[in-house]
Amino acid sequence: MICDSATLTPMLFAADDSVIALADRCPHLRSLGLYFCKNITDRAMYSLAQSKVNNKMWRSVNGGNDEDGLRTLNISQCTSLSPSAVQAVCDSSPALHTCSGR
């Protein structure tokens, strides 16, 4: 089974571990909704930025291209995120075209 989309919203109690698990276990993740997940922190964003979802080496080994990786991310009302953590996800996601909340 390929997981390419996940929404954790509006889960007020969703935590970094949920996002980290998705990042680690869903390399085909293309869309992630975290709207109003106020407990999501920079730790989750940095994990997502460094994950197989966006890892260029992983994509090249497996025949992927820059269109692979996260395409949409909704972090609206995720108030515990720093601009640098969000930027890390944006920088590591060449296919990202929608980042609500950035």
Image: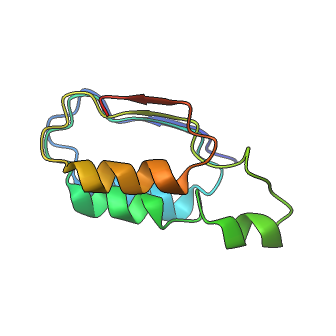
Residue 72 image position (x, y, % from top left): 52, 33
For residue 43, which quarter of the picture?
Answer: bottom left
Rendered residue at 64%/41% (across/down): 95
Q: Is residue 77 above or below residue 68?
A: above
61 lies above or below 44: below
**x, y percent for residue 85:** 29, 56
Residue at 19 percent across and 48 percent down: it is 81
Residue 7 is at least partly visible in this image: yes
**Is 37 displayed left or right of 25 in the figure?**
left
Give left or right: position of 31 versus 62. Answer: left
| Image coloring type | rainbow
Q: Residue at x 26, y 27 (%)?
A: 76
Task: Name, please, the residue furthest toward the right.
Answer: 63
Marks counted in the figure total 0
Is 33 left, or right, of 92 in this rendering?
Answer: left
Q: Is residue 17 visible?
A: no
Identity of the residue drawn at 52% across and 57% down: 92
